[in-house]
Image: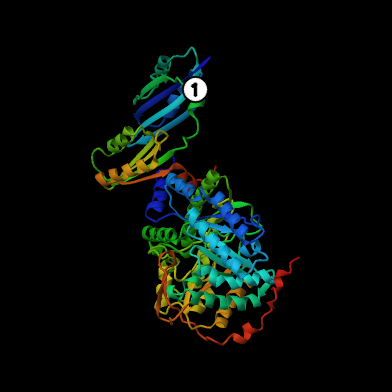
Amino acid sequence: MLRSDQILATVEMIQKENLDVRTVTMGISLLDCRGRDIDETCSRIEQKIARLAGEFVSTCDLVSRRLGIPIVNKRISITPIALVGAGFERGDFVQLAISLDRVAGQVGVDILGGFSAQVEKGMTTTDREYIASIPEALAATERVCASINIGSSQKGINMDALDMVGRTVKELAEMTRDQGGFGAAKFVVFCNQPGDNPFMAGAIHGVEEAEAVLNVGVSGPGVIARALERLIATAGAENLRLDDLAEEIKQTTFRVTRCGELVGRQVSKALGIEFGVVDLSLAPTPTIGDSVGEILQILGVDAIGAPGSTAILAMLNDAVKKGGLFASKTVGGLSGAFIPVMEDALLAEAVGRDELCLEKLEAMTCVCSVGLDMVAIPGSVDAETISAIIADEMALGMINNKTTAARLIPVPGKEAGDHVSFGGLFGASPIMPVRNVGKSSRFIAWGGRMPAPIHSFKN
Amino acid sequence: MERQMIISVMSKDRPGIIADVTGAIFELDGDLADLNQSVLCGYLTMILIATFKNTITPEDVIAKLSHTKSDIKFDAIVKVMDTPIEMMQAQLPEKTYILTAQGKNQHGLVYGISSFCYQRNINIMDLATTLADDQYTMILQLDLSSIASIKEVRDDLDAYAKKTGLRVVLQHNDIFRVTNEISMK
């Protein structure tokens, strides 16, 4: 048998620190679902998802019970829909979204991602129709999430698409005005979007992927926070230095990732579907004690956003990767710490206290994944300013060869300091002020493309 | 022909016990297969498996062991194994679970939890307990092969924990393996 202390350490992790598997996401290729018309295509898509994912949720529940580890979310990602719907028009894409929403409900998943397009270099006629459909498609559905990749380190940034997504975000929020602009929380804009990310709203099943795969997202930041607290309590803060804390994060991540790998492999074996990757991201939830912000506080800043926050986040992100990489056969997806403001209770509080501003948040996204995520801004901010905020975030990803994303919610009728709540996993937060509104429209109006950076020319 | 014997030894701990016992086996031309020993509060207990020629009997082994030259003698039991060792060293059952139970020390804790297992035909494969301050910790490795519904056992355990005031956790053995070992086979 194993050593008693090892067993007790693992029990602590599971019981007191809420170890769970954050998400198991089934990626499904829909490239073979194209029919003669929209009705036949929808019908084929529904049949394929129902066939492959029919037993998905019940199998996850079975493995979860057997191992005694909760699997919090069961989700589906699909081939970017603009590829499946080539030649279709705006109304057809809305119909596709409704069809996807229906089958997602039927198989019992709460979110389906991949209502997406990849337009980092240019847009086809279909891509434009797809983008035009997003506000209506997301307003008409519950479970469907949309994402669009408008930039990459290889190809630069598509500024025409950037202009369109700023307006899309505004329209989405307006169409879901009665829900505080919730529609915008289901739409995320990427640079360097990975095709195997299990986390929503940005999960897609990339064209490079197999017929169907299972990707796993590991447990949240609560486990890391509790492990650090325990180390500090037992060893004494005066006897610890920063590298000791980094080591603790690394070792804890190893254990957490191993649990994710075990669960993923067992679900994959039971369903007969290929195991894809473990995504090593620390994804917070609005639950108390499950916050990335809390880790920053434990590691030494009294206010999140205070000088030092970026440095701590950089160390945290790196230690998580180092611990997780060795624990899993295949690591992928986003793999880093998330700082989604509305979904992280302490980050949201820091916004309310004016300790965390948009510019500091942007700086912090340089050293972690994924970007300006779940940031509620005043509904009065214009589309061009939103596009420009997204442009800055895309540039960070493009130049630094990393994934960045933006999920901004211009809450209709609310101003900085007001409060918005979406409930559940989507959380709540005060509205974050945006400075220099309306001063970037000449930049956005250029359109065209921002050329790929010099370091993309490696051939 | 050969036969395998299981030998159990108990003694007050002193230097040389393992040398004495394995020396006796060596002199009888026996081959040591597996050995497990543990010391608790100054007393040693050891269980080992050895292969002898068919002409050697358990009585011969006992006689040889009793010829050790030491003031502290040990008690020994020797039995012939009825199942070959190769068959006994199979992998852990698929439904191997680890049960941990912690709480304030009191009479009958191990009896209580082991009776719980016995009533449900759960075999305890390994058990370790520690007492620190007044907190008692029991760690049991269990074979739940005969259990149809893990959920039912968990529900029963929850009720048991509530009744006794123990903190009881049941997790699959694989969880502990993958979080503490490098290899993930």
Q: Is residue B43 above or below residue A149?
A: above
Residue B80 location (% of width, % of height):
43, 18
Residue A248 location (% of width, % of height):
46, 58
Q: Is residue A335 visible?
A: no
Q: Nearer the viewer, residue A212 or A456?
A: A212
Q: Is residue B105 above or below residue A105?
A: above
Q: Nearer the viewer, residue A65 or A185?
A: A185
- Residue behind mark 1: B84
Q: Dot 1 falls on which chain?
A: B
Q: Is residue A191 above or below residue A268?
A: below
Number of callouts: 1
Residue B57 falls in image quadrant: top left
Q: Report the residue that reaches farthest toward the top.
A: B55
Amino acid type at mark 1? Pro
- The residue positioned 42% from the left and 15% from the top of the image is B60
Residue A238 falls in image quadrant: bottom left
Residue A452 falls in image quadrant: bottom right
Screen quadrant of the C terminus of chain B: top right
* Colouring rule applied to residues: rainbow
Q: Residues within 10 Å of mark 1 (few under 14, many from 20)?
A: few
Q: Is residue A407 above or below residue B153?
A: below
Q: Is residue A200 left or right of residue A92?
A: left
Q: Is residue B109 visible?
A: yes
Residue A381 location (% of width, % of height):
51, 83
- The residue positioned 50% from the left and 52% from the top of the image is A260
